[in-house]
Amino acid sequence: MPIEFTPSPRRSLGVEVELGIIDVESRHLVPRANDVISALLSGHADVTEHPKVKQELFLSTIEIITGVCLTAAEAHADLTATLREVQGYLEPRGMALLGGGVHPFTDPASLQRRPNKRYDNLVNRIQWPARRLQIHGIHFHVGIGDADRAIAVLNRSLRYLPLFVALSSSSPYWEGTDTGLASVRTKIFESLPTAGLPVRFADWAHYEDYVEIMLETNGIGSIREIWWDIRPHAQYGTLEFRMSDGTATLREAVGLAALAQCLVEYLDSSLSEGLGPAEPSEWTVRENKWRAARFGLDAQLVGEGGQTIGVPDAVADLLTVLQPIGVELGCERELGWVREILDTGSSSSRQRAFIDQGATLTEVVDRMVLELGTDRIAP
């Protein structure tokens, strides 16, 4: 089945951030996405959909998205403007937005689903795993100019996937309980049949064969239901990085977006020159993703020969490799925000430290709301 890949301008960047809507008194998620979007649409004449604010499976979640950006700074400004627009509606009505991979104490069974035939069919087919998707992630689209090259870069980018999981980890609590994981969202999302690590393909034709078979055998309802951690997006002409938890701040999200943009540029250029890293073995990617989800920034990642390296050292090494590309792409500042995560800890580690100081999960929610609202790590 031919799937047309529409090339994007090389290095282009798009960012999608999923956020929870909470009541500021109860700190629980509330199903107000329809109200938010309806109100915001009144400010956008002659459109039926908001260009930057979208709905998700549950009515307590909204997604803010950028347009096609050329720099991480442009993406940050775009997201910030949309966030302020949404907050302008919510705050006078006693609501706020929450970043992070999951709400720390919400019962997924209490959430209201968006009335939508596609979502109804999806939940009917998948059942329990889909009904507990009280999770929020961030996605990065990085433009790439050729279908086969997209597959080649995807395969090599898997080596770095666990670093994104560790850096973004922000979901240690689930239904009021410490899970012992840095990212419980990762494990919840993996329970979907076409989520998790991607299938390895030799080229675009091999990928087309896979999609055709999955459609013909009702494995998926559409190509949109392939939810891998990294996937090619034929319509946008991008590689889409989907492995990260929602972050507490936009700075963290855009720092990781800059990391993804520079990484794709590095791997794409290396392939053109016959250089760069080889494809990692499947077992190391799988093992290291688990370690990153379990231990976050404290994970010791395993190499092909059995050696180990801590996540902070692996991130620092990668940032050193990408530094010249960051200069070229104008995202040195945003790559610096990745270094800030190493200094301050990921959101999961900050949440646990706050609890260790005697805070409650309600106060954790307040802190996360503050961090998103100010775009700064709370002291």
Image (cartoon, helix red, strand yellow):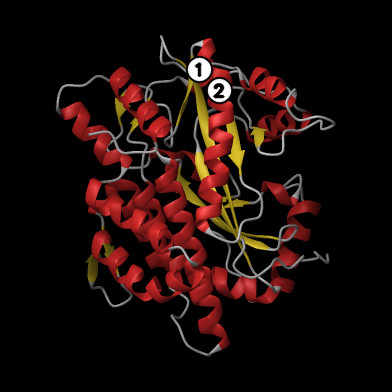
Residue type, label 1: Glu
The percent coordinates of residue 250 (x first, y second) are 45, 42
What is the CA distance from the residue labelled 1 to the residue labelled 2?
6 Å
Q: Residue at x 31, y 54 (%)?
A: 291
Relative depth, front residue between 359 and 106: 359
Relative depth, front residue between 20 and 158: 20
Query: Pointer 1 and pointer 2: residues touching (CB < 8 Å)?
Result: yes
Disc 1 target residue: 91
The percent coordinates of residue 239 (x first, y second) are 61, 62
Residue 171: image quadrant is top left
Relative depth, front residue between 226 and 150: 150
Extreme left residue here?
357
Residue type, label 2: Gly
Classify the position of the N terminus by image quarter. Answer: bottom right
Q: Is mark 1 on a helix, strand or loop?
A: helix
Disc 2 target residue: 88
